[in-house]
Amino acid sequence: MGLLVEGTDYEVMGVQVGTVFNEVVIRTINTVDDGDTLVVDLSDYGISDTGLIGVEGWEHTTDNSIVVQANPTTVVASGELTLTVSGSNDNNPRHYLVKGHAKPNPTSAL
């Protein structure tokens, strides 16, 4: 499939804006394959371009039944988070939890 498109291949299920960090939940359709990618603009969800805390991922190895952890490979460049789907199976839905904060991460002293 390659590059996943929001609204067709994946959707943002919800956004939780907190006092310490923000969370974004992303769900893909069940035709997503290992190696596909999706791009998230962190600023759309109140996360600084250097404020990413982490990403957790899960793969439904059987639709809506068996769930295993499958964290994606991630890269952040110019405030855009690229998630590369990982896992051993093709054609399975995935869920991702993206966490970050609005304040940039310090580059040296706090």
Image (spheres, grey):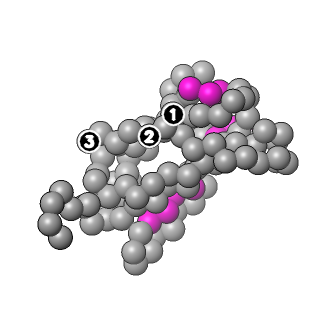
Nearer to the camera, 8 or 89? 89
Q: Position of residue 40 (x, y in %)?
A: 43, 44
Residue 22: quarter of image:
bottom left
Q: Quadrant of the N terminus?
A: top right
* Disc 1 + disc 2, Cβ < 8 Å: yes
Q: Which residues are magenta?
A: 22-35
Q: Position of residue 84 (x, y in %)?
A: 51, 33
Please tell me which residue is depicted at 72% across the width and 29% down the height of the picture.
89
* Residue on which the image places disc 1: 84
* Residue on which the image places disc 2: 74
Q: Position of residue 4 (x, y in %)?
A: 54, 31
Q: Is residue 84 above or below residue 102?
A: above
* Numbered disc 2: secondary structure: strand
Mark 3 and mark 1: span between their CA atoms? 17 Å
* Numbered disc 1: secondary structure: strand
* Residue on which the image places disc 3: 78
Side of 55 relative to 9 (left or right)? left
Nearer to the camera, 27 or 70? 70
Please name the amino acid that badge 3 sits on.
Ser
Nearer to the camera, 64 or 6? 64
Please tell me which residue is depicted at 56% across the width and 27% down the height of the picture.
36
Residue 34 within the segment the image draws in magenta: yes
Q: Position of residue 82 (x, y in %)?
A: 43, 38
Is residue 11 shown to the viewer in this render?
Answer: no
Mark 1 and mark 2: span between their CA atoms? 6 Å
